[in-house]
Image (spheres, helix red, strand yellow):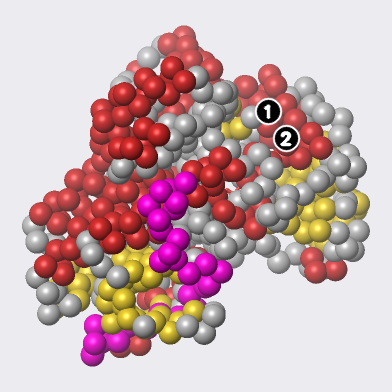
């Protein structure tokens, strides 16, 4: 079978990509590993899973009726609600008929003679298309650390990003949670409410701000909906794709009282915009430390046991250099008598036994192990597709020392392969949906332009790619981001190259750059008929 385009993934990016390409009159086939749409929100069904971006901002803007008709029930939508939204989008635009579910792409090779991508799936299907578009997400390759004895564990072992669809009842069970990133921080309070006992194995404490989640009133929703054109424009032009009043003054230029007042106001408001309090938090270590110390002070206030509070205070990375967590009752959970914190830096996990987790100092008997241990981020899902470009060069080989892209959209030597939210783009530092819409629109416009002109192949110019990759790296060095052992840096995966993968220049500036490149006839890209 031959299509104009193949899209890999039916999360928000794959669904919107399909919709746009169909609008161009192209034939499209989408392959999706899951049995339904939704991507991240299909897989991450762990208790407490919730978006860290406010629901009125975390939604598609491309269709006015969709935007106006959908009603969110809470300030921060839960996973089931976002999945319902994804399903609603699939129904509304009749997307499912072009999606093959339960099917993984296992190989994609570029055929230079015909300018075609030849794609294979685990279902044995072989299809071809001129354009191949990856919509595989940045956090979809779940990672479980290689603890000795893990396979001998007699109870259930669950990864937050591969959660059983039927849910898990923790009543009466002793539960180990390994990992205190966003998934751990969201799930621990909810699991603790159910389980007999929760033991949290923490390697690195994380900064987290309260969500102050609440139901949304119809009045509030109507007001936002009426203002959507202006609000969406602000989001697109902003640094992060989020609303929430970016500060205008540096923390170091105001008095301590003013600083505290601003931090308190932002803490009371809740959410990621806490980091926008002052203009220098992401770039000046002294300003950053002031924000970090404010949050440590809150942890000290909330957590009754001083030693536990101390263990929960992040000290090894600047605040915001790992994506800040947004929680509901996380720190207070440690005041419960049925929750224990184990610091695996001082007391490392040595092995998993048939009945629990053995650290250097103790054996913790548990019935269930929850791995909240994250993902092989950004490059993991792409490299898992088995992509081979011109001259038989594999993407894995090309990216051995770290990803190299032009604008995060293409990688030289892989003509007609577009990556939605790829490394080198601001996606993971932003409101994902804002970034997804921008990438999909850019790719759809590019594909339309190529078709109109009969251009068979588009590829990144190696020099343009080199310049962009150097620019991504250079801009990151103006910030404190590279100081953290984060998944942005590939630091959570043993052996992965340490490269700061996302573009920190901001979604607004990035959009202007991408638009300019297109307006200049796809400057930095090589076209061949
Ligand atoms: P994260 O943020 O990568 O968190 C994974 C957590 O698991 C983190 O605390 C890790 O500690 C911990 N981890 C990983 N490997 C181990 C081992 N071997 N031993 C102990 N602890 C370990 O993933 P999430 O799923 O929570 O969140 C991903 C993103 O989703 C998040 O940033 C939001 O954008 C939404 P570490 O910090 O590496 O020391």
Q: Is residue 463 left or right of residue 388?
A: left
Identify the mark at residue 5; answer none if there is no mark. none
Q: Nearer the viewer, residue 278 or 106?
A: 106
Which corner quadrant holds the N terminus? Answer: bottom left
Read off the residue under disc 1.
Answer: 329
Q: Secondary structure at mark 2?
A: helix
Q: Secondary structure at mark 1?
A: loop
Determine whether label 2 and label 1 are within 8 Å by CB: yes
Q: Is residue 486 left or right of residue 460?
A: right
How crowded pointer 2 is (Cα within 10 Å; few <14, some 14-19, many 20+) is rated as many
Read off the residue under disc 2.
Answer: 189
Q: Is residue 373 visible?
A: no
Tell me if residue 90 is in the magenta stretch: yes
The disc, 2 or 1, on the residue closer to the chain's N-terminal end is: 2
Q: Residue 151: x percent and y percent? A: 80, 69
Picture quadrant where residue 233 is located: top left
Pointer 2 residue Cβ closer than 8 Å to ligand 1:
no
Q: Residue 431: x percent and y percent? A: 40, 41
Residues drawn in magenta: 88-115
In this picture, is 437 found above or below 329?
A: below
Picture quadrant where residue 336 is located: top right
How crowded pointer 1 is (Cα within 10 Å; few <14, some 14-19, many 20+) is rated as some
């Amino acid at each position: 079978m031959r299509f104009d385009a193949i899209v890999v993934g039916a999360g928000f990016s794959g669904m919107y990509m399909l919709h746009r390409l169909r609008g161009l009159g192209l034939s499209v086939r989408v392959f999706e590993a899951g049995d339904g749409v939704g991507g991240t929100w299909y897989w991450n069904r762990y208790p407490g899973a919730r978006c860290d971006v406010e629901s009125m901002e975390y939604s598609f803007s491309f269709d006015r009726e969709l935007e106006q008709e959908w009603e969110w029930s809470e300030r921060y939508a839960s996973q089931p609600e976002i999945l319902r939204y994804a399903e609603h989008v699939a129904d509304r635009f009749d997307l499912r008929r072009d999606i093959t579910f339960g099917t993984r792409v296992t190989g994609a090779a570029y055929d230079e003679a015909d300018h075609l991508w030849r794609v294979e799936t685990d279902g044995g299907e072989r299809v071809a298309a001129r354009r191949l578009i990856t919509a595989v997400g940045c956090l979809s390759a779940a990672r479980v650390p290689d603890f000795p004895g893990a396979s001998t564990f007699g109870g259930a072992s669950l990864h937050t990003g591969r959660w059983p669809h039927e849910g898990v009842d923790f009543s009466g069970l002793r539960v180990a949670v390994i990992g205190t990133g966003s998934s751990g921080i969201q799930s621990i309070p909810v699991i603790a409410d159910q389980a007999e006992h929760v033991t949290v194995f923490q390697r690195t404490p994380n900064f987290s701000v309260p969500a102050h989640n609440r139901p949304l009133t119809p009045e509030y929703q109507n007001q936002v909906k009426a203002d959507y054109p202006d609000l969406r424009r602000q989001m697109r032009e902003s640094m992060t794709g989020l609303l929430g009043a970016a500060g205008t003054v540096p923390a170091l230029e105001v008095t301590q009282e003013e600083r505290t007042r601003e931090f308190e106001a932002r803490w009371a408001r809740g959410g990621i915009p806490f980091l926008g309090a002052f203009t220098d938090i992401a770039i000046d270590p002294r300003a950053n430390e002031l924000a970090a110390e404010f949050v440590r002070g809150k942890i000290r206030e909330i957590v009754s046991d001083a030693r536990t509070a101390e263990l929960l205070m992040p000290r090894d990375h600047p605040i915001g250099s790992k994506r800040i967590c947004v929680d509901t009752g996380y720190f207070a959970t440690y005041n419960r008598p049925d929750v224990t914190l184990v610091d695996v830096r001082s007391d490392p996990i040595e092995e998993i036994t048939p009945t629990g987790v053995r650290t250097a100092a103790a054996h913790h008997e548990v019935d269930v192990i929850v791995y909240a241990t994250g993902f092989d981020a950004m490059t993991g899902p792409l490299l898992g597709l088995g992509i081979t470009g011109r001259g038989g060069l594999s993407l894995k080989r090309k990216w051995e020392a770290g990803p190299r892209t032009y604008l995060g959209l293409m990688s030289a030597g892989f003509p007609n392969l577009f990556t939605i939210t790829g490394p080198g783009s601001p996606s993971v530092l932003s409101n994902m949906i804002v970034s997804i819409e921008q990438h999909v629109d850019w790719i759809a416009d590019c594909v339309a332009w190529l078709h109109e002109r009969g251009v068979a192949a588009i590829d990144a110019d190696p020099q343009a790619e080199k310049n962009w990759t150097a620019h991504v790296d250079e801009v990151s060095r103006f910030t404190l981001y590279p100081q953290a052992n984060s998944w942005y840096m590939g630091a959570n995966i043993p052996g992965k190259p340490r490269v700061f993968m996302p573009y920190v220049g901001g979604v607004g500036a990035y959009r202007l750059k991408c638009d300019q490149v297109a307006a200049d006839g796809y400057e930095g890209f090589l076209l061949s008929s």
